[in-house]
Amino acid sequence: MNWKIACIQLDIVFGDPVQNYQRAEEQIKQAATQQPDVIVLPELWTTGYDLERLDEIADADAKETLSLLKKWAKQYTVNIVGGSVANKTADGVYNTLLIVDSAGEEVKQYSKLHLFKLMDEHKYLLPGSSDGSFKLGEIPCAGFICYDIRFPEWIRTHTAKGAEVLFISAEWPLARLAHWRALLITRAIENQCFVVACNRSGSDPNNEFAGHSMIIDPWGEIVAEAGTGEEILTASVDFSQSIAIRKQIPIFQDRRPEFYK
Ligand SMILES: NC(=O)CCC(=O)C(=O)O
């Protein structure tokens, strides 16, 4: 089975959901002309890192964003890994990844497990407490958010249960571009998985962001990589490749988890 994937490397407008909804809609419309199976958006794409104003601009129970994602998914018959949004709940605000299928049905919500202190997330956001596993059609997938990729043991709990594609939505700064590339390639090789990583472009008052969204195959080869600017990155992936690699080097059979404590 093959999938065509499109990552929308959006230049997010700081603290302005109205403009970001409009810009995302334009980009999704454009991406849809290539008839992808999955469209992916970056982290906190409705607000950016305007954390001080979250009370005002976070999406209540992610309702508005979910309803738009469902509408776009149905309109273009495309699965959407709808990036993450600031999701305002009765307990506080989570950084939540939203996934909808091509029929416009909600598939999964995953809230970022590891908050990134260097960007003050712990002061404004609550950490999630559930896993990122989901299926798109028959394909087992897992979703993560940015800093999560520094925690191989978290990713592994998902691939050990069968995930074949790792989707990562991010706002990763340019200052650590080398880490972004190395971590993503490593996660693909060590898990024999496709890695689909959608970063943002542009800058905000505190950071310049790296762009360089990437689609990586289970051998660790980069299938497609964006530049630093706003871009729609597309590539096709062939799942027979991960089956072949997992047969050739059967790491999931050879693991000795009883010794990994
Ligand atoms: N938004 C994030 O989680 C950024 C993570 C990051 O920059 C890192 O170096 O890790």
Image (spheres, helix red, strand yellow):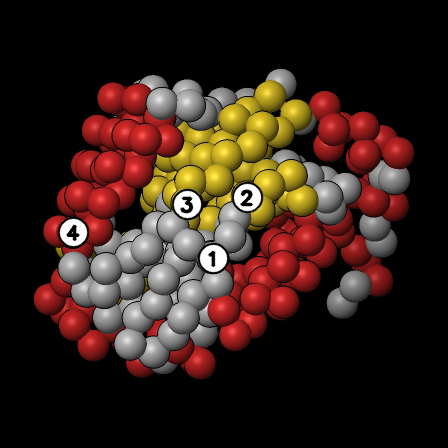
Note whether ligand 1 is within 8 Å of mark 3.
no
Q: Which residue is mark 2?
A: 196
- The amino acid on which the numbered mark 2 sits, given as a three-letter code, is Val
Residue named by callout 4: 19
For the residues labelled 1 and 4, the Cα–Cα distance comes to 21 Å
Dot 3 amino acid type = Glu
What element does badge 2 sit on?
A: strand
- Image quadrant in which the C terminus is located: bottom right
Q: Percent position (x, y) of residue 235? A: 56, 32
Residue in the image at 30% along x and 70% along y: 204
Q: Earlier in the sequence, mark 2 or mark 4?
A: 4
Q: CA distance from mark 2 to mark 3?
A: 15 Å
Quadrant of the drawing holding the N terminus:
top right
**Mark in the foreground, 1 or 2:** 1
> Disc 3 designates what residue?
231
Mark 1 to mark 3: distance in Å?
Answer: 8 Å
Residue 137: x and y, percent?
49, 23
* Mark 4 surroundings within 10 Å by alpha-carbon count, few (fewer than 14), some (14 through 19), many (20 or more): some
Q: Amino acid at mark 4?
A: Gln
Image height of 134 relative to 225, above or below: above
Position above or below: 82 against 96: above
